[in-house]
Amino acid sequence: MVCGLPFAWRKKWARCWDEVRYCSERCRRQKAKPASTD
């Protein structure tokens, strides 16, 4: 996973869970920026 934020399994990801890299569309768009630890 790219951002490092925890997130839960979702039914829509059932067939591609191993390929899930982003927790949300917002995270996907900001893929070059690491998550802040504030």
Image: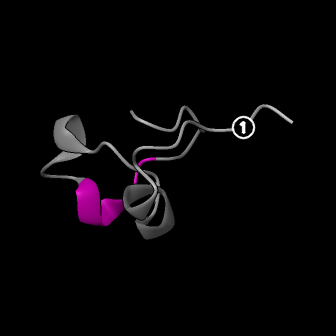
Q: Residue furthest left?
A: 15
Looking at the rendered structure, the kind of residue marked 1 is: Ser
Quadrant of the snapshot with the N terminus: top left
Report x, y in % for residue 20.
27, 45
Q: Residue farthest to the front?
A: 32
Left or right, 12 with reference to 9: left
Left or right: 15 as drawn, with respect to 34: left
Residue at (54, 31) in percent of width and height: 4
Total numbered labels:
1
Colour basis: one colour
Tell me where the magenta segment starts and ends, as one range.
Answer: 9-13
Tell me the crowding category of disc 1: few under 14, some 14 to 19, or many 20 or more residues within 10 angstroms, Cα based.
Answer: few
Residue 13 at x, y percent in the picture: 25, 56
In the rendered image, residue 28, in percent from the top left (x then y), is placed at: 38, 58
Residue 22 in magenta stretch: no
Question: In the image, is residue 29 above or below residue 3?
Answer: below
Closer to us: 16 or 34: 34
Per the image, is 10 magenta? yes
Q: Quadrant of residue 35?
A: top right
User: Which residue was labeled with disc 1?
Assistant: 36
Q: Main secondary structure of the magenta part?
A: helix
Q: Which of the two residues, 9 or 28, is positioned nearer the viewer here?
A: 28
Helix, strand or loop at label 1? It is loop
